[in-house]
Image (spheres, rainbow, N blue to C red):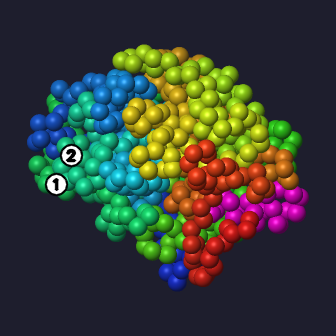
Amino acid sequence: MTLLVRIAALALALVLAGCGSGAGNGGLTLPEPNALTVADIQRVIAQAVNEAKARQKPATIVVIDRVGNVLAAFQMNGAPKMFVFNGARGPILGGLEGVTLPIELASLSKALTAAYFSSNGNAFTTRTAGQVIQQNFNPSEKNTPAGPLFGVQFSQITCSDVSKTAADGTIGTKRSPIGFAADPGGLPLYKNGQVIGAIGVMSSSDYTVVTEIISTTTDEDEMIATAGTNGLAAPDAIRADRITADGRSLRFINPGSLASDPAAAPPFAAINGVEGTLITIPLYGGNPIVAGTVYGDPPSGIRPDTTPAFAGTGAWILVDNANNNRYPPIAGSDGLLTAAEVTQILKSAIEVANRTRAQVRQPPGSVAQVSMVVVDTNGEILGFIRQPDALVDAIDVIVQKARTAVFFSNPNAAAELSALPPAMYLPPSGAQSPITTYVNNARAFFNNPNIFADGTAFSTRSIGEIAEPFFPEGIEANPAGPLSKPSNEWSIFNNGLELDLVYNRLVAPLLKPNDPTQLAKGCTGNKRIRNGITLFGGGFPIYRGNQLVGAIGASGDGTDQSDLIAFLGLANAGKALNTGVGNAPPAIRADQLVPQGQGTRLRYVNCPPAPFNNSTDQNVCAGL
């Protein structure tokens, strides 16, 4: 770490020491210079291979660092070579259902999910992810709303312009080859209480999701991964099963006993070339083994900000290979927001975040850790900052959130959606799914031929509600929202507009990994939503009076906390700037819409009660 960055990190620690509850820094454990060494990685693989051998389940094992660099990929002799998408909802044909791809891609996606959804305050696994992305929360509980991260599986994907691949030589967060995983077998790795990476395991060709929250079945992949984490396992105090969301306990792993003693695993040199071999994952790497980056050092692509603009806020930024800020505050490409306005919006948002009590972090009273972004009406990123221990998944997700909000709030949205080509499903379906179907469905749903063309302001929470397989959300006797597949066709791998928008580009780079043009085409064919859309709270359009001028996105903690930070941060920025910039006028917000025959309004924002540490403030978003 350079002297300048170390000084910035020390200043950050002093700032945050005054934030939060009586626990000094609100429970925040600042990132320290820990990383996976080659010896660590060899031990993880050897322990996992030893367990897989004991279970007679030859597996493909991938190890990554916190920002997604593939450090090693090991395939055991006899391991399946391909996997198949299975949304576990019966014989559904369409989307990714039944599609087959090389199995190492699934192992990598599991590892990325575990690393990107974990921090120094929470340790999540792919089992945790599967719990929070389905149509009900908890899964299998009837007539309950969708999971708090409904639809997050289609972020960080191969066509993103925010995260990169190893193939383009760019540092920083890496894309996931097939989005985020909900299939058990991905676990985070920790050293000295710091998340430093993850392991992902596939020993079966079935890439699926657990649909019964009460299931206690021992999962083979999960046990193999658990053995691999021995000596680098997540601290008990921050595991998902110590954390609640919406009053529900989260899951970490299912109970089970190891079939081997990880401490007795043979050295890596004794298994390499005997039990299996290192392999290279196209676009990612994996052979030879390489050490992980230190999160917070410039080579990780994420470091503390050192500019005066955000002094005292504890902001961190994304940097390029030359250690330059990738997204410093700039004026909009459409001329509708100034650099000063972008700076203030981000500053106000992080000031709210620094007061906010975290939902998904331990210990209680910890400060929320989120990322924040502003985009213009063209979807261009105008500025990006994050808190030091924010989840890595948010880096791509917040851009999706902001772009989703600005796209659907634009009067040209219906026409631009209708102009997009259909999703061309791969075998076994081979069908086409026209994007225009969703526009027509929305027109009928709202009984409004001008929906997405009349200037209504949509938040990502509003869009997410009409993209669920039941509306109102979770009421299973009701039909699907207009942006969803019908409920009898819906699965996490065939969920509607969100997937169909990116489908043609999602796996194209994987099918043609040596074609560099596949990496540069974007996800949707529309630059406003070039890395796709997302379906849960934290994204809001920005207005100057009645004019749409951009959008803000926030993510990294509970969904309501994301709403709070983006919405209240924008409102506070408007007061500080006094230039007319702020949230959408209440009269044009999507919560004024009442879908025909449903008798219920859409939601626009949902701020948590008593959201701040050291404060009794309630209803802080009321009247804004």
Q: Looking at the image, which is closer to me, 323 or 24?
A: 24
Magenta span: chief secondary structure: helix
Q: Amino acid at mark 1?
A: Gly
Looking at the image, the residue that sits furthest to the front is 597
**The C terminus - image quarter:** bottom right
**Is 202 on the left-hand or right-hand side of 275?**
right
- Write the start and end of the magenta stretch as one range: 564-582
Q: Residue at x 56, y 48 (%)?
A: 598
Q: Is residue 371 visible?
A: no
Residue 336 locus on image (x, y percent): 85, 45
* Disc 1 element: loop
Residue 119 locus on image (x, y percent): 45, 58
Q: Looking at the image, which is closer to me, 237 or 100?
A: 100
Q: Is residue 576 magenta?
A: yes
Q: Residue at x 18, y 49 (%)?
A: 218
Q: Is residue 462 visible?
A: yes
Residue annotated with mark 2:
219
**The N terminus - image quarter:** bottom right
The tag earlier along the polypeptide, 2 or 1, is 2
Contact? badges 2 and 1 (CB < 8 Å): yes
Q: Is residue 555 magenta?
A: no
Residue 571 locus on image (x, y percent): 75, 63
576 over 317 or under it: above or below: below
Q: Residue at x 77, y 39 (%)?
A: 454
Q: Amino acid at mark 2?
A: Asp
Residue annotated with mark 1:
256
